[in-house]
Image (cartoon, rainbow, N blue to C red):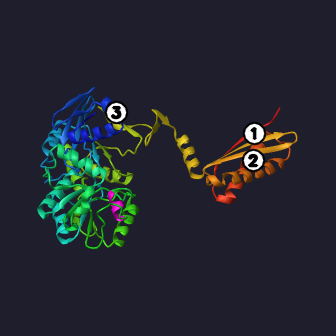
Amino acid sequence: MWGPPYALELVGERAADHEILSHSRLLETSPRKPFQIGSFQIEPVRVTHSMVDATALAIRTDAGTIVHTGDFKIDPDPPDGQVFDADRLRELGDEGVALLLSDSTNSDVEGPTGSESSVAEAIRRVVDETPGAVVVTIFASNAHRMRVIGDIAQATGRKLVLLGRGVGVHSRIARELSHLSWPSDLVWPDKRVGELPKSKVLAIATGAQGEPNAALGRLSRGEIGGLDLGEGDAVVLSARAIPGNEVDIAARVDALARRGVKVRSRLTDRGLHVSGHAHRPEQREMIRLVRPRAFIPVHGTRHHLTRHAELAREEGVGEVLVLENGRSAELDAAGVREGPTYRSGRVHVFAGRVIEPDVLDARGKLAEAGVVTVTVVVGAEGCDAHAKTRGVTAATAEAEMADRIEEAVRVAVEGVPAPRDDARLEEAARLAARRAVTTVTGARPQTLITLVRPR
C-alpha cells in the first residue's frame, strides 16, 4: 500500500489490530514525487483537507492523464502550512488531462468554505465564556482541529484531556509526525481528570456523530468518572452531522441539556466548524485549474453528483458521466464512456470465505425471532411430534413451549385430508408450529420441519 505518512500510520494501526502488519508493505509517498505501479505512473499533489497530508493523485496512463482530487478544499491558511498546490494542478492542466474525478460532497453549497484557522477564534470565545469544563467533539482524524484546541488550552491555562480511543490514536500519530507540538505537560491523563478543577479542563472527545458508546455519549449519561458535566459546563459540537446521524446527535444533545450543560454548535455559533470539503466555488476552481477533457463527479449522493456534473458542463467540459456505485467507466483516446456494472457494497467475510447475502438474510431472521425445529413421525397408527426451540422464549419456558407446539402439530397433521403426501403434511405442521408460537409471543420464528415415515 502506498500513501502519505499520516495515512500509512493509521493503516499500520489497523493492520496491527488485525494481526496482518507483518504481511503488509507500506510505502511512503511525497507530493510531486511520482512512483510507478505496473503501467501507471502516479504523482501525489498536495491539497488541503481537514485531515493532514492530504493529496490528490495525477495518474498517467496509456489513455491519458487522470486526476483524482480525493477529499479536498482550498484552504488559504491551513494550520500546518501545507498549502494547496494550485500551481502543480495548473501545470497538469497545461500538459492535458483526459479525465478529472472530483469531490462532490458540498456541491450545493455556495460561498467560501472557510479556513481551519478561523475555527480557533470561535472555540476560544466559548472557552472564555465558560466558567466550568469545556468539551469539544471533533472527527478524530482532524489533527488541524486538535492543533487549534491545544493552542487554546495553552493560551487559557487549561489542561488538555483526550477522551476516546480514536482521539488518542490520532493525537499520538500526529505528535509522532510533528503535526502537533504540544508540550509534555499540556495533556492530562483522562483517568485523573477528577483531580482538576473544572475551570482547568479543555477536553477533546469522540462521538461527534452521536454514537452512544463514544466519549460524548458516555459523558451525556455521566459514565466518565471524574468528569460529571452539569451547570456551568459547555460542549462544543465542532463537526458536521453526517446525513442519517441527526437523530443520534439530537439524543446526545437532549441528554446534555437535561444535565444543564450548554451545547454549542454551528447552529448557535457558525464559526465553530468549517467543512473539509470544497464548496461549489472551489469545485469550480478545481475544474478551471485542471481543464479536463472529461469529468466524473465522485463522493456524494446522486443529487450531489448531478449538481457537480452540471457545474462541469457550465465550465465547458465536453464529456461528463454521472456514475453510482457498481457502475464503471472506460477511458481511451476516443474519450470516456460507461462500462459494465459490477457487484458493489459490503462484502462479509469469515475465515477467509465470503458469506453470501442469502446466508446473512437467514441469520438475520434467526436473530430476530429464533428457530423452531419439529420432527414429525407419521405411522399407520397416527402421528407424533417432537419440538425444540432456540431464541423463542426464555430457557425456563422452552419445555412448556415445546409441549404446546407438539400438541398443535399433532392435531394439524392428523386433520390433513387425503391425499396425505409429504408436502401437504410438512406445510400443515409448519403452519401449526408457527401459529402456536405466534399466539404466545407475537413473533414468527424460522420453523424447520422434518417428516419421518417408519418402514
Which numbered marker is on residue 81? none
For the question of whether residue 113 can be seen, the reply is no
1 or 3: tag closer to the N-terminus: 3
Most foreground residue, 110 or 43:
43
Q: Residue furthest top?
A: 38
Position in image of residue 383 (x %, y %): 82, 44
Q: What element carries label 2?
A: helix
Characterize the local packing of mark 2: few (<14), some (14-19) or many (20 or more) Cα atoms within 10 angstroms. Answer: many
Between residue 301 and residue 308, name the one nearer to us: 301
Secondary structure type for disc 1: strand
Q: Which of marks 3 and 2 is in front?
A: 3
Give the percent coordinates (x, y) of residue 26.
26, 33
Q: Mark 1 points at which residue?
A: 451
**Mark 2 or mark 3, which is nearer the start of the sequence?**
3
* 46, above or below 163, in the image: above
The location of residue 246, given as percent across then percent down, is 38, 62
Up-down relation of residue 304 to residue 46 (above or below)? below
Q: In which quarter of the image is the C terminus?
A: top right
On the question of residue 107 being in view, the answer is yes
Q: Tell me if label 1 and label 3 are in contact, CB under 8 Å.
A: no
Q: In which quadrant of the rendered image does the N terminus lie?
A: top left
Q: Provide the residue designation for mark 2.
A: 429
Task: Give the residue at mark 3.
Answer: 20
Span of residues in magenta:
215-220
Q: Amino acid under label 3?
A: Ile
Q: Which residue is drawn at 18% across and 43% down?
A: 176
At x 11%, y 62%, the residue is 155
Instruction: Residue type at mark 1: give it.
Output: Leu
| Count of numbered circles in the view | 3
Q: Are marks 2 and 1 in contact (CB under 8 Å)?
A: yes
